[in-house]
Amino acid sequence: MISNYLKKYFKEKNISQYEVERRTGISQSKINLSLNGKRKLTADELIKIALVFDIDLNKIKEII
């Protein structure tokens, strides 16, 4: 799942949900719900996160 990949990525890079919110503008509550599998990220949110944190979209494509 994308949420598991992002959760692991953020943990490895020591990136907090607060930092994701601050740098992307996506609310921390949405991020939390998404990372815990209770909400799906929109395509726009996923692209924004990938661009801001330099995540390879091809890796995400493989997960999907």
Image: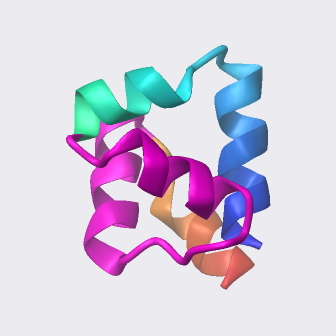
Q: Residue furthest left?
A: 25
Q: Quick check: 36 above or below 24? A: below
Query: At which x and y percent is residue 12?
Result: 76, 23
Query: At which x and y percent is residue 49?
Result: 37, 48
Q: Quick check: 13 above or below 40? A: above
Going by the image, does 32 lie left or right of 57?
right
Q: Where does the magenta region start and end?
A: 25-54
Magenta stretch, main secondary structure, is helix
- Of 62 and 41, nearer the camera is 41
- Of 47 and 28, nearer the camera is 28
Residue 14 occupies quadrant? top right
- Of 57 and 43, nearer the camera is 43
Is residue 57 rendered magenta in the image? no
Going by the image, does 25 lie left or right of 30?
left
Going by the image, does 49 lie left or right of 16?
left
Query: At which x and y percent is residue 55?
Result: 49, 45
Please give the name of the residue rendered at 27% of the width and 25% of the height, measured from the top-left corner.
22
Please give the name of the residue rendered at 44% of the width and 24% of the height, measured from the top-left corner.
18
Please give the name of the residue rendered at 69% of the width and 78% of the height, measured from the top-left corner.
62
The quadrant in which the C terminus is found is: bottom right
